Amino acid sequence: MQHVANMSQVLPIRFQEHLQLTNVGIQASNIGFNTLTMESDKFICVREKVGDTAQVVIIDMADPTNPIRRPISGDSAIMNPASKVIALKGKYCEKRDPHLACIAYERGQCDRELINVCNENSLFKSEARYLVKRRDPELWAEVLQETNQYRRQLIDQVVQTALSETQDPEDISVTVKAFMTADLPNELIELLEKIVLDNSAFSDHRNLQNLLILTAIKADHTRVMDYITRLDNYDAPDIANIAIGNQLYEEAFAIFKKFDVNTSAIQVCLKSGASVVLIEHINNLDRAYEFAERCNESAVWSQLAKAQLQQSLVKEAIDSFIKADDPTAYIDVVDTAHRTGHWEDLVRYLIMARRKARESYVESELCYAYAKTNRLADLEEFIAAPNHADIQKIGDRCFDDGMFDAAKLLYNNVSNFARLAITLVHLKEFQGAVESARKANSTRTWKEVCFACVDNEQFRLAQNCGLHIVVHADELEDLINYYQDRGYFDELINLLEAALGLERAHMGMFTELAILYSKYKPGKMREHLELFWSRVNIPKVLRAAEQAHLWSELVFLYDKYEEYDNAVLTMMAHPTEAWRESHFKDVITKVANIELYYKAIQFYLDYKPMLLNDLLLVLSPRMDHTRAVHFFSKTNHLKLVKGYLRSVQSLNNKAINEALNSLLIEEEDYTGLRTSIDAFDHFDNIALAQSLEKHDLIEFRRIAAYLYKGNNRWKQSVELCKKDKLFKDAMEYAAESKNSDTAEELLQWFLENGNHDCFAACLFHCYDLLHPDVIMELAWRHNIMDFAMPYLINVMREYITKVNRLEDVEKKRSEENETNETKPMMNMIGEPQLMITAGPGVMGPGYPNAGYANNINYTAGMPSYQGYSM
């Protein structure tokens, strides 16, 4: 025990490990342990307890079947026999005896160790046996991987040895599934051949035989026929169908033939040629025919007939169907015979089918076949006798195929006058066709007969038919197109003119006649519209008139349809034919799009400039005058519309005012300009003043000063007047400015220029703005007191008057204050004293009464309140 390594771990005990201990003479029921201790590669220790006695069992790996038992002491090493027990044993044996190692690994199910030992020592037979018995899909997947270099040797041993020795079907099942999972079809075939073909216990196993054949179908087609022949216990129908799906038709045929499934066999025989050339098809059908002759069964003949029918061998197919006495495929037979034109053979088949089943389809097709073969006598006899044929449908088919004689018989039989009328048309019996149409009383019939009469130029009969058509609005267009496409315009117009008096005349008739007039008789269109404009579809007629370039009629229709915008546009686009002055001015006021006003203005500028002012007066209620003025300014036509500008100036529009003012300036009409400025003030005053202050004429410069004055630019106004020596205007503007500085500057300027008269006049014009002391100083300094004296005298008189007035006012105020002071004292004697809160003029006890002015003591030299100062 001194060599025991210090390696321990807690390991669970498995039941399988207990069983392993019996191999070395230890009873698993006596084992109880918690830890594993390994002495070396040579010894294993296990604690064994029997009753109350515990002992240690020492296993010598050199002689594992003779363990040594020793009593347990306190320091005994205890061993847990997990899988490593056997692994140590196997590892010990690998170098000495690989076969013994395999035994050890097999008992311990040490899969990877066993596989490694077998691979290294080429023990593939042992490995194959172990894998088969082990039944582990994961282990199989590992050894069957393509990366395993020993896979081929292993597979050979599995096929040759391992499966031959086993009798357990589960071993076989797991092994086969492993090969299938590994996708090894060729190796799987070898495996299954060994199991199934070598007279083993599983040779008759149905699933294995199925799997062998299916694997061969998938991997090696050359072996399939051999397996089908040698094997007997497999699912024949399913295997055959899978073979057909993989195009192994011969093999499938062999299966069906082997198991006497004749109908399927012949199907395969026919199917095998589906993807080859025509000669092989024929060979297959020949094989099928020989097979059917040999079997001579109705079902086989039916299968052969269907195949022949698919190959469009109609005569042979019908012969086969007749031999089979099988009418079930009559639909396919009829369709194929129709396509190939085998009508005589079809009659034979349908007669046989009619004997077997009185189907409506069969009898209808027999009726049609009689018609196709031109056996009219047989047809007439057939429809006269009781039958289940759909006579109406067959008659329609005969009609569609151009067999009108047969169709006539059939329609007569069912009294279908509508179709009979059309049939008579094709037979050129037009009068009879019209009579049949009258009996049918169908719009469609009338149309067809009418069109046929038109094609054959029977216009009298066509008109009789047409009168029954035009009263239907939905049919009118087709009728018109039919006539027009063939160039019969006059006949069409005559027809519609005759129809206008009908009781059922409708809008479409009047509309279409108007359109026809526009195309072929434009001279009659205006008269027609004036009479019937309320009964026509105006939009349609509008398009027709536009296409025909009938501009006057187009404007008329636009006006009636209340599309005034389009009417105006049309008149402007085609003035020669469509424009009338009074009509244009009447319509232009009703348009919805105001933009047309400006297009109309341009139109009048181009074509009728002298009538422009009349147009503008009409447009003025809704027109944007600013935009109009800008337009005329841009085109330099303001002079042309001066009358318009004067008529709308009452609106006081800025653009209008400025445009008219510019015209007056250009015409040097300063009187008109002054009148315009005074009457209409909405314009850029400063810009106009700036343009006028440099004008050559003094009157326009005077207007500039007037404009500056009106905009409170007093200084500029006065300066401009001084510059042009308009002294009176200067004095008036200075006085109106209410600015003392402006007035004093003007006086100073008069003195500097020695204009004493104007100085004296200005004193009175600006009287309220001047300071007497300043005036006195200026007069004294320039020695013109005589010119200033009238002003000074007037000022002195005014001041004396003011002082006297103030004295009188002050005296009255003093008297009123005294009266007010004594009156409250009288009222307080007879009344109880009330608590009065502090209010205006009442400050409470101990405070002086501040509400009375007469309590204020003025000292000498202190200014007293004198009222309003001036």
Image (tube, rainbow, N blue to C red):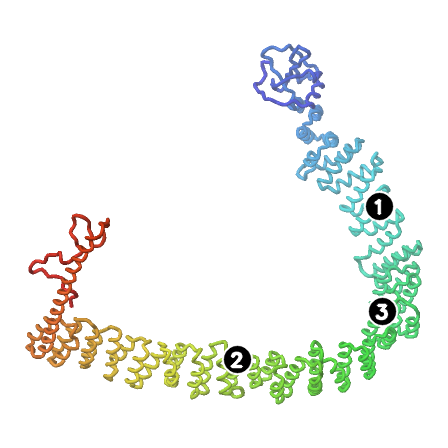
- Name the kind of residue labelled 3 in the image: Gly
- Judged left or right of residue 404, residue 646 is left
Give the x, y percent position of residue 400: 80, 73
Q: Amino acid at mark 2?
A: Tyr
Residue drawn at 55 percent across, 82 percent down: 559
Which dot marks residue 564? 2
Q: Is residue 33 left or right of residue 225?
A: left
Image coordinates of residue 107 in percent, x first then y, are: 71, 24
Viewer-proximal residue, 673 or 381? 673
Badge 2 marks a residue whose secondary structure is helix
Q: Secondary structure at mark 1?
A: helix
Compared across the picture, whether 838 is left or right of 230 comes to: left
- Residue for badge 3: 341
Q: Quadrant of residue 419?
A: bottom right
Residue at 86 percent across and 43 percent down: it is 230
User: Mark 2 or 3 closer to N-term?
Assistant: 3
Q: Residues within 10 Å of mark 1 (few under 14, many from 20)?
A: some
Q: Mark 1 — residue?
A: 236
Are the residues tagged 1 and 3 within 8 Å (C-beta)? no
How many numbered discs? 3
- Circles 2 and 3, Cβ within 8 Å, touching? The answer is no
- Binning the other alpha carbons within 10 Å of mark 2 as few (below 14), some (14 to 19) or many (20 upward) gives many
Name the spot of residue 70 as percent of width and height, x first: 65, 10
